[in-house]
Amino acid sequence: MTKFEDARVLIVGLGLIGGSIARGLKRKNPKQTIIACDCDSGQIAAALESKDVDQVFGIDDLPKACAEADLVVVALPPQATATILPSLESSCNERAIITDVASVKGNVVESAKKLPVEFSARFVPGHPIAGSEKSGYLASKGDLFEGRNIILTPLDNNSPEALQLVTAMWTILGANMLAMSVQRHDEVLAATSHLPHLLAYSIVDVLAKQEKSGDIFRYAAGGFADFSRLASSDARMWSDIFVANRVASAEVLGAMITALQALKTALETSPDTRLGTDLHALFSDAKRTREAFINTHFNPTANTHMNGKSVVFIAGQSGANLPQVKGRVRVPGDKSISHRAIIFGAIAEGRTEVSGFLEGEDALNTVAAFRELGVTIVGPENGKLSIIGVGRDGLCAPRKPLYMGNSGTAMRLLSGLLAAQQFDSELSGDESLTKRPMARVVEPLRLMGASIDAQAGGRPPLQIAPAKLHGIHYAMPMASAQVKSCLLLAGLYADGVTEISEPGICRDHTERMLEGFGYPLTRSADGSTVSLEGGHALKATTIDVPSDISSATFFLVAAAICPGSDVVLEHVGINPTRTGVINILKLMGADISILNPRSVGGEPVAELWIKYAPLHGVTIPESQIPLAIDEFPALFIASAVAQGETVLRGAEELRVKESDRLAAMAAGLERIGVDCEMFTDGIRISGDPEARFAAAEIDSQGDHRIAMAFAIASLKAAGELRILNCANVATSFPNFVELSSKLGLEIRVEHA
């Protein structure tokens, strides 16, 4: 495969985008050979004078321009791009990779699909989300793409080499890589780019025809200038865009017209007071949404990631009678499996298709990290994504720290993978994650030869330098699926055998998934030891992510504590290393049935049917602790309404989760009137099935599981529970409030 720095790049079209690509590549590497082809002699002359191109051709000489090009970038409007592809197919040499920059992909891809498959395998559609109202080569800038998003819409038969070369170009230009399906791209762009331009052109036209004297423009304030700025864009280019994307544009315009008509009706008929209240709510929501967008995408110094301090849950049930929780729902995909699907799919050979993927912030941060590592990931769209693997040794050096958000799982697993790479990397996270200890993975990785620097107390961020690893035999001091998985990932690259022994059962998603990707490993008969030899390849596969039993737990507990409740949870993962919550609830007397058990992609799944039954307190067996470690916040709520005492000991792990979950839950339970006693390794809870919890304000400490646990507790509360710092619920269960409402819970969301 041609290295990008050695590639001869042909740019067809020297306007704003094409010119900016030429300028940017020359500034990054003056030795890069840049060829240009354009129909405008003025554009050609300007490019030659600036010395941003080495050779130029008129459009009639396109075959000559294509002859020696390794990468052809078509920087033309959508219609022109679709028209020129057949000429490129007949003119380019058989090794040339072709990409484009058109802002509409449907017609371009349809044109490509009519050509021989050998050509379409080398054509990678792309679209830089960058531009300006100015056009032409003289408006181009070498830094136009720095920090901007580039959306690829890969074809099913695109070769890995084609994707890697196109990705390398945009990465060198400083862009952030995204990927999505062709249809989704055109729908999204119709709403976020094309509609604003259409409205800007239309409002200027309407005002011009309405007020022919010109006074309306003479006295216009800055707001009009800001809003109408888009109407200064190239009229020919934008008419071409709307013709190419007319279906999606008409659909989003129809929705806009409906909303405007409703607003017009309200202005004509609503009483002043109510109208003012409605408008204030609409404007406030829009203002908050826009500010969040600006902070996330255009303000690198802002705290753009969820820190748990901006969302408040107001949970409380109206009416004097206790509610019943009833219904049938499917909770989001398993977070642990979603993380692993991305990691293993990225280093596999071939295209891995994933469904049921959790579109929560933690998992999306893992997607973003692997895109920064050079992996093309299409989606997610409705829980589906495609990972076009780069192979075991194909990851690229990241240009910036990899942000893991709130996910200790992602940080610990990636530390093992990155410790074996031959480039520098850094793993960072949000405020909560930077307080969590990483020594449990750093120390055994160092025993394997890894070069990792952590902050005081072994905390993130982690700086990782290239190192050559060797296998070890490691006996984990405490059961931890994250430590085991971290070392297995490092072991894929290590010389010799890596063997890990665990003192108790912990999650085996990594082992199951490695087997699904065709990687050989050995497990002892009792499951306490796993080993693998480094150096083998992973082969792409298909993964259907089960619903997360940790998320299902909140609704299991909701039904367990409310008389008359009856809930079915669909397609839940019942991996035996994760079913501690079912075992404990049954031990407490819960009525849970496992329906239609089956295996999906190597993971056991089933429907869980739970009906209310009185609970009683228990001493939780230590053998169940690692099988339910993430579910204890919800189980503590069940314990608070069980008859008698529930005692948990040997659960020190709860003190180093997203928060000190023992302390956070004990504090919250006391505030709602529950008698409890915290130990260094556990808790005692005195339950009362007849009691109603007191109304209270509770600090979830930015811990999503604490927040959701107390939202469930509101079912038994005498008043509202105001739960602070709930934004991180989006990391694992983004539609928690929506599904809660479907089952009968009442939760309002406020923004602090």
Image (cartoon, rainbow, N blue to C red):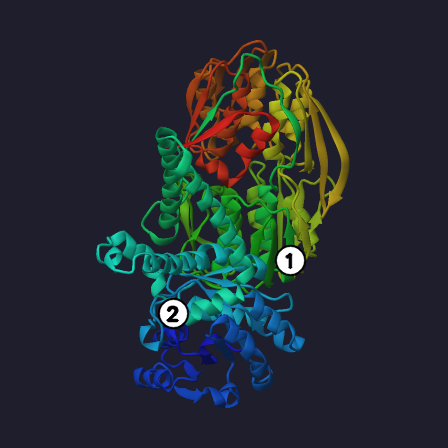
The three-letter amino acid code for the residue at tag 1 is Thr
Single out the mark in the foreground, 1 or 2: 2
Q: Looking at the rendering, which quadrant does residue 287 occupy?
A: top left
Few, some or many C-alpha atoms within 10 Å of disc 1 (few <14, some 14-19, many ≥20)? many
At horizontal 52% and vertical 23% (from top left) the residue drawn is: 682
Asked if residue 476 lies left or right of residue 194, the reply is right
Say whether residue 136 is visible.
yes
Mark linked to residue 52: none
Q: State whether residue 427 is above or below residue 76.
A: above
Disc 1 or 2, which lies upstream in sequence?
Answer: 2
Asked if residue 509 lies left or right of residue 687, the reply is right
Q: Residue 553: image x %, image y %?
A: 61, 30
Nearer to us in this view, 629 or 179: 179
Give the labeled residue for mark 2.
234
Asked if residue 94 lies left or right of residue 592, the reply is left
Q: Residue 599: image x %, image y %?
A: 75, 43
Nearer to us in this view, 746 or 240: 240
In the displayed orientation, state which residue is furthest to the top. Answer: 690
At horizontal 24% and vertical 54% (from top left) the residue drawn is: 220
The three-letter amino acid code for the residue at tag 2 is Asp
Q: Looking at the rendering, which quadrant does residue 612 occupy?
A: top right
For the residues labelled 1 and 2, the Cα–Cα distance comes to 40 Å
Q: State whether residue 213 is above or below residue 623.
A: below
Give the labeled residue for mark 1.
352
Q: Looking at the rendering, which quadrant does residue 660 occupy?
A: top left
Q: Residue 171: image x %, image y %?
A: 44, 66
At horizontal 54% and vertical 76% (from top left) the residue drawn is: 98
Nearer to us in this view, 197 or 670: 197
Few, some or many C-alpha atoms within 10 Å of disc 2 (few <14, some 14-19, many ≥20)? some
